[in-house]
Image (cartoon, coloured by chain):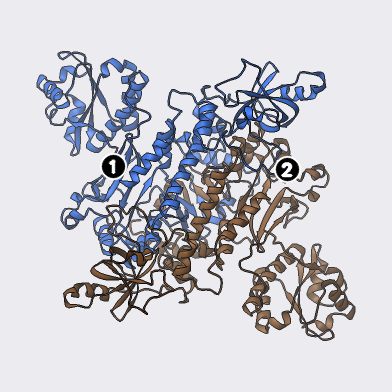
Chain colours: A brown, B blue
Amino acid sequence: MYFLSWLSQLCRGLSRPIGRTAQPTWGSFSRSLALSSQRRIPEFNSFVARTNTCGELRSSHLGQEVTLCGWIQYRRQNIFLVLRDCHGLVQVVIPQDETAASVKKILCEAPLESVVQVSGTVISRPPGQENAKMPTGEIEIKVKTAELLNSCKKLPFEIKDFVKKTEALRLQYRYLDLRSFQMQYNLRLRSQVVMKMREYLCNLHGFVDIETPTLFKRTPGGAKEFLVPSREPGKFYSLPQSPQQFKQLLMVGGLDRYFQVARCYRDEGSRPDRQPEFTQIVDISNVFKHTEVRFLQDALSKPQGAVKAMCVREGANYLKKKDIESIRKFAADHFKEEVLPVFLKNKENWNSPVAKFILEKQRLELIRLMEIQEDDVVLLTAGEHKKACSLLGKLRLACADILEMNGMVLRDPALFSFLWVVDFPLFLPKEDNPLELESAHHPFTAPHPGDIHLLYTEPEKVRSQHYDLVLNGSEIGGGSIRIHDAELQHYILATLLKEDVKLLSHLLQALDYGAPPHGGIALGLDRLMCLITGAASIRDVIAFPKSFRGHDLMSNAPDSVSPQELKPYHIQVSWPADSEAERSSLNHSHHPES
Amino acid sequence: MYFLSWLSQLCRGLSRPIGRTAQPTWGSFSRSLALSSQRRIPEFNSFVARTNTCGELRSSHLGQEVTLCGWIQYRRQNIFLVLRDCHGLVQVVIPQDETAASVKKILCEAPLESVVQVSGTVISRPPGQENAKMPTGEIEIKVKTAELLNSCKKLPFEIKDFVKKTEALRLQYRYLDLRSFQMQYNLRLRSQVVMKMREYLCNLHGFVDIETPTLFKRTPGGAKEFLVPSREPGKFYSLPQSPQQFKQLLMVGGLDRYFQVARCYRDEGSRPDRQPEFTQIVDISNVFKHTEVRFLQDALSKPQGAVKAMCVREGANYLKKKDIESIRKFAADHFKEEVLPVFLKNKENWNSPVAKFILEKQRLELIRLMEIQEDDVVLLTAGEHKKACSLLGKLRLACADILEMNGMVLRDPALFSFLWVVDFPLFLPKEDNPLELESAHHPFTAPHPGDIHLLYTEPEKVRSQHYDLVLNGSEIGGGSIRIHDAELQHYILATLLKEDVKLLSHLLQALDYGAPPHGGIALGLDRLMCLITGAASIRDVIAFPKSFRGHDLMSNAPDSVSPQELKPYHIQVSWPADSEAERSSLNHSHHPES
């Protein structure tokens, strides 16, 4: 498919010098980014003192008088100083003669990470002192004048990628963390990836980039939408989870081929991730129909209960006891579900806490179904069907991480494997009331053309025209063909989902005025960038991320607001009983004017 | 200056076929947009039935079998039908023979603006029936099959640019309004302008595009910031008015050459526009030091009072009585200030309600100061200095609009005249307490290097390093060199402005860790697009604008929210006494579940 081949090309085109093991260096960094030391920043203007960037100087610049600005990265014996800007590093020779005492004083006394401006001549390094690993390694700067532009206080941590620091500290001092090679690399690469996407969409395919509002009206079932009080009593805007409705309205408006790099606001609160993960598993419920193992019994006695298993090939050789413990803990933390590891050390002797409860017949059936071989480890899990699938999917990725850390070669980091997931159900039974239906994705997804007749008889059997895109096992995007028929949309909203259609009257009305058939897809840019850069967390590909509890650890947002400031919005805080004391202390300490 | 020459090039490069007088046509529309009928949409994929767009067909396509999709724009005598998509218009010949009765029925009965798919052959129009004004005017489609994809209800207004409709109706049915030539043109041009800006910044100059958070912490004096309640009692995020602080933190983080197409959230409430407008006026306070005219007396008796005048050349020939009335009304509506028109029909006879109160000496002095000539109209205004300046600036633009409507040629619509405004004061006396100072722009603007010593003695005299950019009389952008010294920033915030520095401790701290000298500029994209397209309102260059009271007339946002939905955010509505009745009715009618 065209879209996929482009995305795949885009990913392949990007170098991936930074894996989980490799440390980035300015060399690979600057080689891999198109806009880097190879290219000069053109046209320094009259307001900027610097003539060159630190990273661009080469032997071809020998003899030139240059002015550079940058941070002091490193100093050696008060003789050499390495200056850094976003284009790279360059070595500066601190003058040692009496007449340059003031220059020496500035360059030797300024703390690391201070900002300095130096002027001098590009000279070649003495023979044997060239540094082949450094793009500017053939030259150094003989300094004549220096100016301290801003001094740096004692740092809370060293700005070196190999110095470990807690994520909380990194987020608190994000502006320092951003100076690291890795963060510079991730954010600059992200900028270029997005630019390539834009060029593809706008310049090659005539897409039109349109910004849609972020202050909107609450959507039905929009429990994850942030509210924004307005100055009209009792009236609220909502920050939409996605430009879902606007996308459709643009199609009705004839703005064919729309795209947007959109913000999505999702107030996750404490709701778990609803997205079922794709996974390869084997359902072994039938094997354990009659079992004495309690937790398998329990699971199978429930309506949607299932026992699922996954086979980790050669797991016995690679998974240590503590790895199994961490897998159990992972399962408990994320799903409150038990995992039963079964070690098959040899065919007769199953090394497992429940081995004795597994009947010989069950054992043989399991070996046959799962094609278990010696030294494999089998992970059993039991519970509600969807949850068990989701858990095993996550366990599969966790196991792969552990196996790779233990030296097994499983995944080629340069390989980008895409997968489309299709034929999702249009509806799912509600978790709290399985007799009622809810949308598997959202109520605007069109039913599969082959299943439309089932909508009126067996809606739970209708497949949707939703599609998900998976890259290397992670979902990176999804989309759907939408309903363009107002009657069908009304039937699904009002009759099947029992939603208040008044909240969506504008959309239903729009469909009535010649809405064309339409569909689309949304990619999760954060997750895609994680896969491309090999970052462990989406926080490493976002400039100013929130902590997982939604806090900005740098500025301490969200923060208290005085009752006076709430007045124009006609709201007041409903304090839980036990925080009255805190409230009054806040009023006095944070807002002395109130 | 480099930036300006680029911006100027960018504006000149854009064709401006749509002025206040010219009606856009698909011809000029498609010629002026690069991605248009000249270029095919490449690679239609297997899911899309259409083989071509409506706008791309030419004589070179004669004989081809094509499938087109589009809206029915127009139908003539059940013989011809004009089909429209976003690439243009094409004429379709409805088959009249018996065998094609079902095709004829579909195409003749579908209401205008319905969506249809037709397949047929590209044929040449009979000699003499070619339409040179239509890019596809040499050909037409001989239809074989047709399918109605979606029928359109009776429209609330005709989708033709020359059909006048109220703005409220346009906003309510925005998805229909977006189908108009003008809106399609404005939004597609905007997309391309932004793309050109990105290519310039990213590809040519190595800028890095970084998204900054929109859920942040309230800034001091941020009375215009929307609040977003969090799930922690009493804690609120704030939607920042601009990425001001993040921009600076990115500079501290070494992300040199950052840019962003950013959302700015400004809850204007009822505060008037604080931005003083640039204007050429003449201060004539001294002329009227001793006057009998009451409103001039009143104004001059106040500390900042002034009398200002503007001369409209040949105004007596072009400004009609109702124009003067509308100017007065404009002044009253916007500034609660009076405007005194003085017509100078001939040198002896001043045609003005206050002519008799103006002394001969004052009249002569006024003529000399303002170089008044016969047939000029002088507009006098009096009031607080800044307000009077701002009013005359707006009046100047309003007069120009009126004069141009009355046939005077004043401004060349193809001309883009840029102007930098510099040397703003760093501080202004507070409106409600002139003894205290407030920032003229914001507290992070650096003082002019030549005035730093005055900060400690006469801060009100310090000029700032702020700059504004004006295009054709409208401010389109502004920026500043920022303070990079923590001590100076602390002095200005705490000592001069008396702000609570605790709210900004993260920024002050960041400046202490080697912040480089830095500055930037922000362009107002909406206003710039207005000037480029000649649109009367920024609402014509935004896909889904809010009304001036901040309402979304299409979806009816902001809207009521049930107390249940507010619970997770620990807030409740403080109902003003007189709306209790309304509240309870809302609870019952809108939220039957509550």
Q: Are marks 2 and 1 in contact (CB under 8 Å)?
A: no
Please, what secondary structure does the residue beneath circle 2 have?
helix
> Label 2 marks which chain's residue?
A
- In the orientation shown, which residue stands out farthest toward the left? B361
For label 2, count other residues whose C-alpha is less than 10 Å away and answer few (under 14), some (14-19) or many (20+). Answer: many
- Nearer the observer, disc 2 or disc 1? 1
With respect to residue B93, does A16 lie above or below?
below
Foreground pick, B322 / A433: B322
Foreground pick, A80 / A250: A80
Foreground pick, A163 / A220: A163
With respect to residue B140, does A593 lie above or below?
below
Residue B257: percent from the left, percent from the top?
39, 56
Q: Which residue is mark 1?
A: B420
Amino acid under disc 1: Trp
With respect to residue A460, does A297 lie above or below?
below
Q: Residue at x 74, y 51 (%)?
A: A427
Foreground pick, B197 / A403: B197
Q: Which residue is mark 2?
A: A492
